[in-house]
Image (spheres, grey):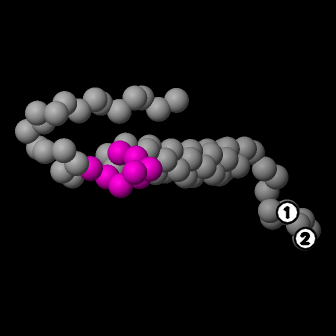
Amino acid sequence: MKPEPEARTVDDSAGAGAGDAPPGAGDPVEHLWNAAHEFLAAARAVIDAADAVVVEQQRRVAAPRPPRLRRIDVD
């Protein structure tokens, strides 16, 4: 739900319509704010995914595994 736009008075010092966005364009600052939030959410998702990969790799390294070489008794 969008907040109601601010009501303008007749004696507005900037003048009526000065710097207004075209009808239906919305507030440009609100658009930038939403875009910044979406960008940060995407960046957070990338960081979380990279963190999960690093944690998984650390678990694999820490897990004991059988040796790759077998000793052969030649006697």
- Residue 40 can be seen, yes or no: no
Q: Quadrant of residue 8?
A: top left
Residue type indicated by callout 2: Val
Q: Amino acid at mark 1?
A: Arg
Instruction: Tell me, for residue 70, which label it has, or none.
Output: 1
What stretch of residues is rendered in magenta? 20-27
Q: Residue 69: horizontal and vertical position, in percent? A: 81, 64
Q: Is residue 74 magenta?
A: no
At 79% from the left and 56% from the top, the residue drawn is: 67
- Residue labelled with disc 2: 74
At horizontal 90% and vertical 65% (from top left) the residue drawn is: 73
Nearest-to-viewer mark from 1 and 2? 1
Where's the C terminus, which quadrant? bottom right
Residue 37 rendering spot, x and y as whole percentages: 44, 43
State the count of labels: 2
Label 2 secondary element = loop
Residue at the (75%, 45%) spot, across then down: 64
Q: Residue furthest left?
A: 13
